[in-house]
Amino acid sequence: MTYSDTLRPGLQLRVGLRKASWVYEKRVKGGPKRKHTLGAYCTWTTSGQRIPVQIGLSAARERALEIELEAGQGVDRVELAERTRLAKERAVAIRMTVSEVLDIYERLKLSTLRTGEERARELRKVLSTYPHFPANDLTKANLQAIIDEKAAAGKFVYANRLRSYLRAFTHWASRRDYLKEDVGFDLEGTGREMARDRVLSVDDVRSIYRATFELGPLWGPMFRLLVLTGQRRGEIATLRWSNVDLKAHQLTLAGSQTKNGKPHITHLSAPASSELEELSCGRDSSEFVFTTTGKTPSSGISKAKRNLDKLLGDDISHWRLHDLRRAMATALAEAGVPEGVVDRIQNHSASGSAPSAVARVYQQSNLLPQRAVALNRWAEMVTHKSPKIVRLNG
């Protein structure tokens, strides 16, 4: 309920369930109409007891008159209050360290990104020289030196990734006045990136495979399936039980589950089948093979990979999960498995020169029997165990 004062136009008493407050509306000369809350007239307790008058009618009229006189001179109290607030925020921002701004960036921005955890980790690592450095003292030269150092070490892909992370960070921070200017705006990259030629040896893969048995009942089987099947990490991490046919020794993915949008069948060697059979024994009602919540696929594969790296120690230099696919392809090719068979196993098209007519027909075949033989051979290489003979359907 609202009551208007007849003596001072624009002054109102607004009565609510718990409080009655004075409000004054007045247009600033040459500006907008502003609403000012002058304070409470009275309040009531939850039991209905009235608390005495805090700002009476006379006091409210006096405050309204002050605002009216200021507004007539073009003084905008609301705008002044906002300027004061922003000035205080800027003063705080100027005193903030790089580490403090990174904390805010991680909480407000990176936490919303799928790759946010990795970005935060990399930013903290490369900016570790400046944790207590005033954020506003960071220069383009500081950041460019980080990128150039990685490029000089031959880490061109990593250097360009850091450039992207640093530019996003400084842009975000400058837009919110944590930085006076966007010092990362025109950071230079390393030019064209060369394709990675890192290939794990079969011995490397064996070491990785053995180490996975120390990762526990969730990540251990997941990483072993990545090794044994040669499939992409996302396809295995989000695997559903509806994709698994233990009798046929196959995984069947719909086009919506694969990178190239094509349905895909993967033969399960004896060790791969054993992993899934063991997982199925303790299976709950979840549709996902790898899950901690029962409702979604397990997250945290990057952290699990770091734990695996700790187990491996210095035995294997920096590698990625994708390198397991390259290792399989290389080992099978060296063992005499045709390129088309390897391509079908890994569900991508063969690269290189245009295939002949015979090769095109060969590539159009599913080659399921040949793929099964190759995957059994790969499992034998990795585990040092002779494969069991698995009868194929069809």
Image: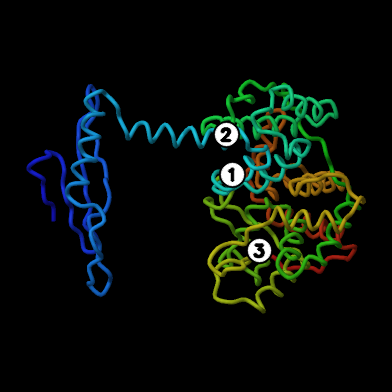
Secondary structure under badge 2? loop
Query: Gap in Å between the C-alphas at discs 2 and 3?
Result: 54 Å
Q: Is residue 76 left or right of residue 363?
A: left
Quadrant position of the C terminus in the picture: bottom right
Indicate the position of residue 253 as horizontal and vertical percent values: 58, 56
Crowd around label 1: few <14 · some 14–19 · many ≥20 (10 Å): few
Describe residue 26's horizontal placement relative to residue 182 as left or right: left
Left or right of 143? Residue 386 is: right
Q: Height in image: 334 above or below 192?
A: below
**Residue drawn at the location 69% of the way across and 52% of the way down:** 231
In-front residue for pair 383/282: 282
Q: Do the CB atoms of the residues marked 2 and 1 lie less than 8 Å apart?
A: yes
Question: Which comes sooner in the sequence, label 2 or label 1?
Answer: 1
Disc 1: which residue: 104
Q: Which colour scheme is used?
A: rainbow
Please tell me which residue is depicted at 84% across the width and 25% down the height of the picture.
152
- Which residue in the rendered view is the most extreme toward the bottom? 281
Q: Which amino acid does label 2 sit on?
A: Tyr
Type of amino acid at the residue the image marks with label 3: Gln
Q: For the residues marked 2 and 1, what is the alpha-carbon distance in whole angstroms?
A: 10 Å
Please name the residue that numbered disc 3 is placed on: 250
Using the image, determine if residue 189 lies above or below residue 33.
above
In the rendered structure, which amino acid carries the disc numbered 1?
A: Ile
- For label 3, the crowd category at 10 Å Cα-Cα, with few meaning under 14, some 14 to 19 and many 20 or more, is many
Say which of marks 2 and 3 sits in front. 2
Residue at mark 2: 178
Dot label at residue 119: none
Q: Nearer the viewer, residue 119 or 262?
A: 119
Q: Which residue is drawn at 48% across and 32% down?
A: 87
Secondary structure beneath disc 3?
strand
Q: Where is residue 79 in the image (x, y as percent from the top left)?
A: 35, 31
